[in-house]
Image: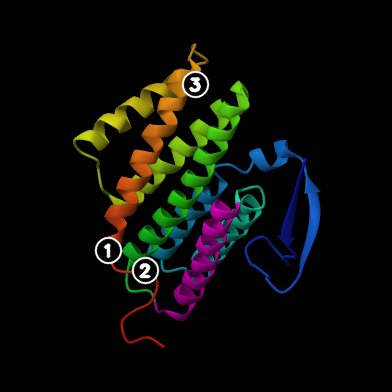
Amino acid sequence: MTMIGVAWLPSLGRAANDRTSQVTVPQSALNSLIGEPDRHFHRAADLYVQGDADGAASAIRAAAALIRIEAGRGSVQDSAKLQMAATDLDTLADNVVSGNVGSRRDLDLAFARADLALAAHYRSMADKALADKDRAGAALWLKAAGDSVDEAAAWTGRSPSGAQAEAWDQMHALQAKIRTSANWSYDEAKKGVGYLGTQIQYLGQQMQNFSAPGVKKGAN
Protein backbone atom coordinates (compact mmCIF):
# COMPACT_ATOMS: atom_id res chain seq x y z
CA MET A 1 0.00 0.00 0.00
CA THR A 2 1.22 3.50 -0.80
CA MET A 3 0.19 6.87 0.62
CA ILE A 4 -0.08 9.44 -2.14
CA GLY A 5 -1.43 12.96 -2.49
CA VAL A 6 -4.14 12.89 -5.12
CA ALA A 7 -5.71 16.02 -6.56
CA TRP A 8 -9.50 16.11 -6.30
CA LEU A 9 -10.63 16.04 -9.93
CA PRO A 10 -14.07 16.71 -11.43
CA SER A 11 -12.85 14.32 -14.12
CA LEU A 12 -9.50 12.71 -14.91
CA GLY A 13 -9.15 15.01 -17.90
CA ARG A 14 -9.07 18.23 -15.87
CA ALA A 15 -6.43 18.66 -13.16
CA ALA A 16 -7.56 20.58 -10.11
CA ASN A 17 -4.55 21.52 -8.05
CA ASP A 18 -6.15 23.57 -5.27
CA ARG A 19 -7.15 20.68 -2.99
CA THR A 20 -5.29 17.47 -2.17
CA SER A 21 -5.94 14.55 0.15
CA GLN A 22 -3.72 11.73 1.36
CA VAL A 23 -5.18 8.39 0.37
CA THR A 24 -3.92 4.84 0.55
CA VAL A 25 -3.70 3.16 -2.83
CA PRO A 26 -2.73 -0.50 -3.38
CA GLN A 27 0.45 -0.97 -5.38
CA SER A 28 -1.45 -3.23 -7.78
CA ALA A 29 -3.80 -0.35 -8.62
CA LEU A 30 -0.90 1.99 -9.29
CA ASN A 31 0.88 -0.66 -11.35
CA SER A 32 -2.17 -1.00 -13.58
CA LEU A 33 -1.70 2.65 -14.59
CA ILE A 34 1.78 2.05 -16.02
CA GLY A 35 1.72 2.99 -19.70
CA GLU A 36 -1.59 4.86 -19.45
CA PRO A 37 -0.05 8.35 -19.85
CA ASP A 38 1.26 7.36 -23.28
CA ARG A 39 -2.15 6.12 -24.31
CA HIS A 40 -3.43 9.63 -23.61
CA PHE A 41 -0.41 11.18 -25.35
CA HIS A 42 -1.17 9.29 -28.56
CA ARG A 43 -4.84 10.22 -28.37
CA ALA A 44 -3.93 13.86 -27.80
CA ALA A 45 -1.61 13.85 -30.82
CA ASP A 46 -4.32 12.34 -33.03
CA LEU A 47 -6.96 14.80 -31.85
CA TYR A 48 -4.60 17.74 -32.31
CA VAL A 49 -3.95 16.74 -35.93
CA GLN A 50 -7.72 16.44 -36.44
CA GLY A 51 -8.16 20.01 -35.18
CA ASP A 52 -9.93 19.02 -31.94
CA ALA A 53 -8.10 21.33 -29.54
CA ASP A 54 -10.43 20.73 -26.60
CA GLY A 55 -10.20 16.95 -26.98
CA ALA A 56 -6.41 17.06 -27.29
CA ALA A 57 -6.13 19.26 -24.21
CA SER A 58 -8.38 16.94 -22.22
CA ALA A 59 -6.18 13.95 -23.10
CA ILE A 60 -3.05 15.87 -22.13
CA ARG A 61 -4.54 16.83 -18.77
CA ALA A 62 -5.53 13.22 -18.15
CA ALA A 63 -1.91 12.16 -18.71
CA ALA A 64 -0.73 14.91 -16.37
CA ALA A 65 -3.11 13.69 -13.65
CA LEU A 66 -1.80 10.13 -13.98
CA ILE A 67 1.80 11.31 -13.78
CA ARG A 68 1.01 13.21 -10.58
CA ILE A 69 -0.41 10.02 -9.09
CA GLU A 70 2.75 8.12 -10.08
CA ALA A 71 4.88 10.85 -8.51
CA GLY A 72 3.38 9.90 -5.15
CA ARG A 73 5.57 6.82 -4.89
CA GLY A 74 8.76 8.22 -6.37
CA SER A 75 11.90 9.34 -4.60
CA VAL A 76 12.13 13.02 -3.68
CA GLN A 77 14.16 13.78 -6.82
CA ASP A 78 12.07 11.67 -9.19
CA SER A 79 8.82 12.92 -7.69
CA ALA A 80 9.87 16.53 -8.24
CA LYS A 81 10.69 15.82 -11.89
CA LEU A 82 7.37 14.06 -12.42
CA GLN A 83 5.45 16.90 -10.79
CA MET A 84 7.28 19.36 -13.04
CA ALA A 85 6.47 17.26 -16.11
CA ALA A 86 2.80 17.21 -15.11
CA THR A 87 2.76 20.99 -14.63
CA ASP A 88 4.38 21.47 -18.04
CA LEU A 89 1.71 19.24 -19.59
CA ASP A 90 -1.08 21.28 -18.00
CA THR A 91 0.50 24.43 -19.43
CA LEU A 92 0.73 22.76 -22.81
CA ALA A 93 -2.96 21.80 -22.63
CA ASP A 94 -3.89 25.43 -21.91
CA ASN A 95 -1.79 26.55 -24.88
CA VAL A 96 -3.45 23.99 -27.14
CA VAL A 97 -6.88 25.36 -26.26
CA SER A 98 -5.79 28.98 -26.72
CA GLY A 99 -4.10 28.23 -30.05
CA ASN A 100 -0.63 29.11 -28.76
CA VAL A 101 1.08 25.88 -29.80
CA GLY A 102 3.36 26.30 -32.77
CA SER A 103 3.14 22.79 -34.20
CA ARG A 104 2.55 19.11 -33.52
CA ARG A 105 6.30 18.91 -32.85
CA ASP A 106 5.78 20.88 -29.64
CA LEU A 107 3.45 18.17 -28.38
CA ASP A 108 5.90 15.44 -29.34
CA LEU A 109 8.75 17.00 -27.36
CA ALA A 110 6.58 17.64 -24.30
CA PHE A 111 5.47 14.01 -24.34
CA ALA A 112 9.09 12.87 -24.76
CA ARG A 113 10.16 14.88 -21.70
CA ALA A 114 7.36 13.39 -19.64
CA ASP A 115 8.29 9.88 -20.77
CA LEU A 116 11.93 10.46 -19.81
CA ALA A 117 10.85 11.59 -16.34
CA LEU A 118 8.79 8.39 -16.03
CA ALA A 119 11.71 6.31 -17.31
CA ALA A 120 14.08 7.78 -14.71
CA HIS A 121 11.50 7.10 -11.98
CA TYR A 122 10.94 3.50 -13.06
CA ARG A 123 14.70 2.98 -13.35
CA SER A 124 15.10 4.09 -9.73
CA MET A 125 12.34 1.68 -8.71
CA ALA A 126 14.10 -1.16 -10.57
CA ASP A 127 17.39 -0.36 -8.85
CA LYS A 128 15.69 -0.47 -5.44
CA ALA A 129 13.92 -3.74 -6.26
CA LEU A 130 17.23 -5.31 -7.24
CA ALA A 131 18.81 -4.14 -3.99
CA ASP A 132 15.90 -5.75 -2.14
CA LYS A 133 16.24 -8.97 -4.19
CA ASP A 134 12.68 -8.41 -5.42
CA ARG A 135 12.80 -10.27 -8.73
CA ALA A 136 9.18 -9.63 -9.72
CA GLY A 137 9.46 -5.94 -8.91
CA ALA A 138 12.72 -5.60 -10.81
CA ALA A 139 11.15 -7.20 -13.89
CA LEU A 140 8.14 -4.88 -13.69
CA TRP A 141 10.18 -1.69 -13.33
CA LEU A 142 12.81 -2.63 -15.90
CA LYS A 143 10.09 -3.25 -18.45
CA ALA A 144 8.27 -0.03 -17.54
CA ALA A 145 11.48 2.00 -17.76
CA GLY A 146 12.46 0.44 -21.07
CA ASP A 147 9.02 1.05 -22.55
CA SER A 148 9.10 4.69 -21.41
CA VAL A 149 12.53 5.19 -22.98
CA ASP A 150 11.27 3.67 -26.23
CA GLU A 151 8.26 6.00 -26.22
CA ALA A 152 10.47 9.02 -25.56
CA ALA A 153 12.73 8.05 -28.43
CA ALA A 154 9.74 7.61 -30.73
CA TRP A 155 8.42 11.07 -29.85
CA THR A 156 11.79 12.70 -30.54
CA GLY A 157 12.36 10.77 -33.74
CA ARG A 158 15.99 10.23 -32.75
CA SER A 159 17.76 6.87 -32.97
CA PRO A 160 20.87 6.21 -30.87
CA SER A 161 24.21 5.40 -32.42
CA GLY A 162 27.55 4.03 -31.26
CA ALA A 163 27.69 3.16 -27.55
CA GLN A 164 24.10 4.33 -27.10
CA ALA A 165 22.90 1.95 -29.80
CA GLU A 166 24.73 -0.95 -28.15
CA ALA A 167 23.14 -0.14 -24.78
CA TRP A 168 19.77 0.12 -26.56
CA ASP A 169 20.18 -3.36 -28.06
CA GLN A 170 21.27 -4.88 -24.75
CA MET A 171 18.31 -3.38 -22.93
CA HIS A 172 15.89 -4.70 -25.54
CA ALA A 173 17.44 -8.16 -25.24
CA LEU A 174 16.82 -8.09 -21.49
CA GLN A 175 13.26 -6.83 -22.04
CA ALA A 176 12.63 -9.74 -24.42
CA LYS A 177 13.72 -12.17 -21.72
CA ILE A 178 11.44 -10.52 -19.17
CA ARG A 179 8.44 -10.53 -21.52
CA THR A 180 8.85 -14.21 -22.39
CA SER A 181 9.55 -15.22 -18.77
CA ALA A 182 12.96 -16.52 -19.81
CA ASN A 183 15.62 -16.86 -17.13
CA TRP A 184 17.56 -13.68 -16.41
CA SER A 185 20.14 -13.00 -13.72
CA TYR A 186 20.47 -10.20 -11.22
CA ASP A 187 23.77 -9.31 -12.90
CA GLU A 188 21.95 -8.89 -16.21
CA ALA A 189 19.32 -6.75 -14.52
CA LYS A 190 21.92 -4.52 -12.89
CA LYS A 191 23.53 -4.03 -16.29
CA GLY A 192 20.04 -3.23 -17.60
CA VAL A 193 19.74 -0.41 -15.08
CA GLY A 194 23.02 0.92 -16.42
CA TYR A 195 21.84 0.64 -20.03
CA LEU A 196 18.72 2.56 -19.13
CA GLY A 197 20.80 5.31 -17.55
CA THR A 198 22.82 5.61 -20.76
CA GLN A 199 19.68 5.86 -22.88
CA ILE A 200 17.99 8.39 -20.60
CA GLN A 201 21.10 10.57 -20.55
CA TYR A 202 21.46 10.38 -24.34
CA LEU A 203 17.85 11.34 -25.04
CA GLY A 204 17.98 14.09 -22.42
CA GLN A 205 21.02 15.59 -24.13
CA GLN A 206 19.30 15.37 -27.50
CA MET A 207 16.25 17.21 -26.24
CA GLN A 208 18.37 20.02 -24.82
CA ASN A 209 19.17 20.87 -28.43
CA PHE A 210 15.49 21.47 -29.18
CA SER A 211 13.60 24.64 -28.35
CA ALA A 212 11.28 24.53 -25.32
CA PRO A 213 7.81 23.31 -26.32
CA GLY A 214 4.47 24.84 -25.70
CA VAL A 215 3.96 28.42 -26.87
CA LYS A 216 4.18 30.23 -30.18
CA LYS A 217 6.80 32.97 -30.31
CA GLY A 218 5.21 36.25 -29.40
CA ALA A 219 2.26 34.60 -27.61
CA ASN A 220 1.24 36.02 -24.25
Q: Front-most of 181 and 59?
A: 181
Name the residue type under label 1. Phe
Residue 88 belongs to magenta span: yes
In this view, 50 is above or below 76: below
**Residues in magenta?**
76-100
Q: Position of residue 151 (x, y in %)?
A: 40, 44
Q: Dots 1 and 3: beta carbons under 8 Å?
A: no
Q: Position of residue 175 (x, y in %)?
A: 44, 25
Residue 177 belongs to magenta span: no
Measure the alpha-carbon separation of dots 1 and 3: 34 Å
Q: Would you name the residue on which mark 2 appears?
A: 213
Q: Front-most of 177 and 167?
A: 167
Tag of residue 178: 3
> At x 49% / y 67%, what residue is drawn?
88
Measure the alpha-carbon separation of dots 2 and 1: 8 Å
Name the residue type under label 2. Pro
In this view, 51 is above or below 119: below
Q: Would you name the residue on which mark 1 appears?
A: 210
